Amino acid sequence: MTDSVRHHATGLTAEELPAYIYDLTALREHAAAVRTALPERVELYYAAKANPGAPLLRALRDAVDGYEVSSGGELAHVRAAVPGAPLAFGGPGKTPAEIAAALDAGVHRWHVESEQELHRLAAALADRPQARTVDVLLRVNLPVGEGALDAVALAMGGRPTPFGLDPDQAEECVRLLTGGGPLGRQLLLRGVHAHLASGLAAAEQLAVAERIVEWSAALADRHGFPLEEVNIGGGMAVDYDDPAARFDWTAFGEGLAKLLDAHPGLRLRTEPGRALTAHCGWYATEVLDVKRSHGEDFAVVRGGTHHLRTPATRGHSQPFEVLPVDAWPHPWPRPAVTTGRATLAGQLCTPKDVLARAAKEADGLRTADRVLFAMAGAYAWNISHHEFLMHPHPGFHYLGE
Ligand SMILES: *Cc1c(COP(=O)(O)O)cnc(C)c1O
């Protein structure tokens, strides 16, 4: 935990908890280091869905080349937060209204998810008064579970999903775009996009990137179109069991540099979300009660998984640090953890509202001590079910804005 986060969390009153605290200075430093680790011919986009908080988007502006958005809502929000920043627009099931809005916003790259989407996009373009073209990448769902990648847990590629085009469908789309037909005059095929997996360490990410680039280069060769760009997706691992660990951006950058050496003229793009912002956010709260239940200690904290759904979604224990509060102004005994471990639960009336299970770090934890959950900067508040049980929303604090 940085000193500024600790200091800020200590200074909040109990009624100001729970609160999300973001260290934007740490975020800027981290993002700058990531940018430095990547070769010049690799563009860095931030996947806004990981955390679209406007102060975070602005803090990332100097380090990133653009933002990846996956809905009309994200598009409008990111446009307003960082005006003029290049946008890549992806996601399955784009509506006609979203397509029209994205055309008006002049997005930099379209990640096309299906053959029908090519037609929808061309039809929307034809409706615009001034004749225009757009730059597209075909999103492909490649099988990558071969050889070295057998052990990798793939979430989105190489198996049935609603995302992207199967390789044979991609071939058909390339024919439609490069065969001299009407679609190809409006939609300019720049290359390929693939986001196949998440939670990969650097060596596995590189193996996936190589596979995507080799496949894309072969596709371009077969159809005789110049392959200008390949977007290799996001999904860089973070380790919720080890908050101090970081994805090895240096090794990743060196590997990408080698890959680029083999493909002169090619531009790569990567679009991480979680690995950029997860570590800069903290969910700060306090212990309201400590209870013994059938032999186990439970510490109930202000807030819960309706604010920080990440541990419930992923089935992990969210890492945390304790800020002891020594003052105890009440005449009654102070409930505390005495069994050497405790489960940290929230205020919701459901057994699923668990932030950390049987945690040894909770040994000795007392009512009114503060608990700061780490790695709450990505897929945290914005994926949570805020209205369930109608508790107040947390505060939001952006340090170093
Ligand atoms: C979610 C997503 C990302 C970001 O994934 P992370 O695991 O947060 O890095 C990037 N690209 C696409 C298409 C996505 O859907």
Image: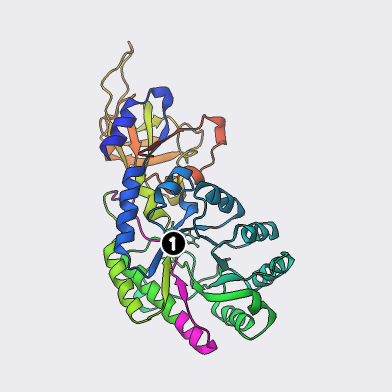
Q: Amino acid at mark 1?
A: Glu
Residue 41, quarter of picture = bottom left
Q: Residue furthest front?
A: 130
Would residue 225 be counted in the magenta stretch? Answer: yes
Q: Position of residue 332 (x, y in %)?
A: 33, 13
Residue 258 picture location, percent across and down: 30, 76
Q: Name the element at disc 1.
A: loop
Res 208 → quadrant: bottom left
- Tell me where the magenta segment starts and ends, as one range: 216-243
| The one of 179 and 294 positioned closer to us in this rendering | 179
Closer-to-camera residue (104/245) = 104
Task: Name the residue rendered at 32%, 22% in the picture.
Answer: 335
Q: Which residue is mark 1?
A: 271
Q: Is residue 344 depicted above or below 91 in this figure?
A: above
Is residue 268 visible in this depiction of the protein? Answer: yes
Say which residue appears at 46% left-offset and 59% top-offset.
Answer: 66
Q: Is residue 149 above or below residue 323?
A: below
Looking at mark 1, is its residue's CB closer than 8 Å to ligand 1? yes
Question: Where in the figure is residue 47, as x and y percent of width and height?
Answer: 47, 56
Q: Is residue 189 left or right of residue 18?
A: right
**For the stretch drawn in magenta, what is the main secondary structure?**
loop
Instruction: Quarter of the image for the N terminus: give it.
Output: top left
Q: Quadrant of the C terminus?
A: top left
